[in-house]
Every structure is written in C-alpha cells, then in structure tokens.
Amino acid sequence: MSGWASGWVRGRDLAIDLGTANTVIYERGRGVVLDEPSVVAVRTGTSQLLAAGHRAKEMLGRTPESVTAVRPLRDGVISDADVTERMIRWFVDQVAPSRLVRPRVVVCVPSDITGVERRALEDATVRSGARRVYVIEETMAAAIGAGLPVEETRASMVVDIGGGTTDVAIISLGGIVTSRTMRIGGDEIDEALLAHVKSEYSLLLGERSAEDLKVGAGSAFPLSEELSERVRGRDLVTGLPRTVTIGSAEVRRAIETPLVQIVELVRTVLDVCPPELAGDVADRGIALTGGGALIRGLDERLSHELGVPVRTADDPLHAVARGAGRCVEEFGTLERVLVDTRRA
C-alpha cells in the first residue's frame, strides 16, 4: 500500500468534484475540505509535479521555460491522465487525516461522458489511492446539492454551468428523465472575451485577466447600474503593456454567443420534456448551479427568454460537491443514484 493511500480513517470517505476549472473535495463528517483550481505546474518535459491548485494557477503565463503550468482536464474530461492522477493525489493528500484505511470515493462525471473517458477518470482515482470508486452524474449531484427533492414524483430541473461543460437535466423519482450536455462553459466565455479584446483593442490578455474581466464586469442581462473593469495586456502593435477600461454592456456583447448557446441548450431540454413533467418545471422552476451561475443576471436572462422561474442555488460553486457529499453521508439512502464501477 502506498504511503498516503494508507492514510485514512475508516468512514472518512470522499466525494470529489473534479472540474475543468476547480476541484472540490467533500469529506464525510467534515463537509467541503478543499477547493482549489484544477491547475498543476510540472517540470517541462517530465511529469514531475511542482505545485497544484492556487499556487499553480498563479504561475499561469508566468513560468520560465523549465516549468509548465497546465490544466489536465478539458471540457470536463481528462486530457492528461498521468498529470490528472498526480493532481488528485496531491489534493487528497492535503486532507488525509491519518494512516489507516483507503477511502471509498464518489466522483462526479458529465452526463455525456463516454465509457473510455469515464474509465480514465476511475482509473486515475483508483491509482491515487481509493479502495473503491462510485460515479454520479454531475446534474444529479448538483440537484441534490441545490436541495431539490430528487426522489419525488414531481420533476426538478437543474442547469449546471462549469468551466468546460454545461449540463442540463430533468429529474424525477431519483433518476434523470432527460438530459443534455454541451461542452461550453466558463472557459468558452473567457475565450470569447480574449477574442473580443484582441479584435477591438489589439490587446492580448492572459487567461487570468479575462477571468477578472468576467468576474468584475460580466453580465448576461442589462444591469440597473452598469459596471466597468480595467484590464491590462500587451499591445499587439507596440508590444508594450497597455490598460483599457471595459464596461459590462460591452462584455455582454462579447460573450453573447456562448450565452445564446447555453439558453438554447436549456430550451432544447424543455422542448423534449414529457408533458406530465413540463408543468412541474413551470411551477418549480429551474435551479442554476456551477461557477457560471454566478454571472450577473443569468437567472433573469433564462427566465425572460424561457418563461420559467429560475433561481441560483445557494453557494452554486459547491453544489455538485455538496450533492455528492450527501451520497457519502447517506450512502444507504442514496446508493441508487450512484454507479459502482465494479459492476459497470
């Protein structure tokens, strides 16, 4: 048994929301114990891990040639299995309390994940020290984490907007009735901002600057008081640093394409919703989760365009991890919503 892998008290099982943007770990009996960016810094040309999480994210765009800062997940799935395994090991090692028994782990996966992609995620988790792995679809975990009554006959609807994917599902009787996933999320919104600033201002921004602009002035619906954000980048003409101020109305125009795609995805799921459940959704509305739910006015935009009440879940960033964590806390009750990878 590997060193850290033996470091677990029986019952200290984990739920891991391994997201494109952030990794969140929930520990049984303790709640959310880790929330770090899904970024690692490795020595160039090797898999030697130098840092992970916040420390590695600070290195994005700032590393010397000997160090590379990377995101090992893209669009909600693993793009580099070896680095992902090392990242999981690094994160879980931060919360390991002792040296006894390896944990059971519940891992969240996108609804449209392929068998090969799911197996890669399971294998990385097992090699990181889990004694047994279960998977749960992110939309189901998000619905549980948002406090939706997923076991009832009446339908609940959830929209989970992460860094790499947007997952939409209608849930009834503890199962997903219909769902759709689109590999568009916060990353594509950032890329739209990068492209806009480059086109309109001949200014090259880094990933962190684009994210700061989205957080500082991003909105999906007109605001009662418009905002603005100063961003600094490299002038593509002179090669020198330059700062510009961009308002929220301009940011809305810049990110309109990915926002329209998200709205249309939700509309598609509503269109295929069984008639018996459509009334439930109209009454109960839609719950928004994930980091994308924090974009100002997104709930108003969806409600305005779809004619359905929309609310943002409490602490939407951690909704998926909290929902998977409830499965860990109430394993006997919620085991039916999990897939045991030994049976799959």
Image (spheres, rainbow, N blue to C red):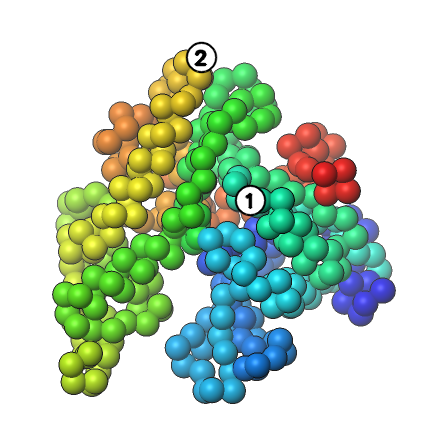
Residue at image mark 2: 276
Label 2 – label 1 distance at C-alpha:
28 Å
Q: Is residue 5 visible?
A: yes
Farthest-out residue, top? 276
Label 1: how many Cα within 10 Å (few below 14, some 14–19, many 20+):
some
Residue at image mark 1: 113
Front residue of 315/218: it is: 218
Q: Amino acid at mark 1?
A: Ile
Q: Could you tell me residue 111's position as x and y percent? A: 53, 39
Say what secondary structure mark 2 lies in: helix
Residue 134 located left or right of residue 215: right
- Does residue 77 lie above or below 307 as drawn? below
Q: Are marks 2 and 1 in contact (CB under 8 Å)?
A: no
Q: Residue at x 79, y 56 (%)?
A: 102
Image quarter of the N terminus: bottom right
Q: Earlier in the sequence, mark 2 or mark 1?
A: 1
Image quadrant of residue 192?
bottom left
Q: Which of the numbered marks, if any, corresponds to residue 290?
A: none
Q: Could you tell me residue 14's position as x and y percent? A: 68, 51
Q: Is residue 141 visible?
A: no
For the residues carrying marks 2 and 1, which lies nearer the camera in this image? 1
Residue 249 located left or right of residue 296: left
Q: Could you tell me residue 252's position as x and y percent? A: 20, 51
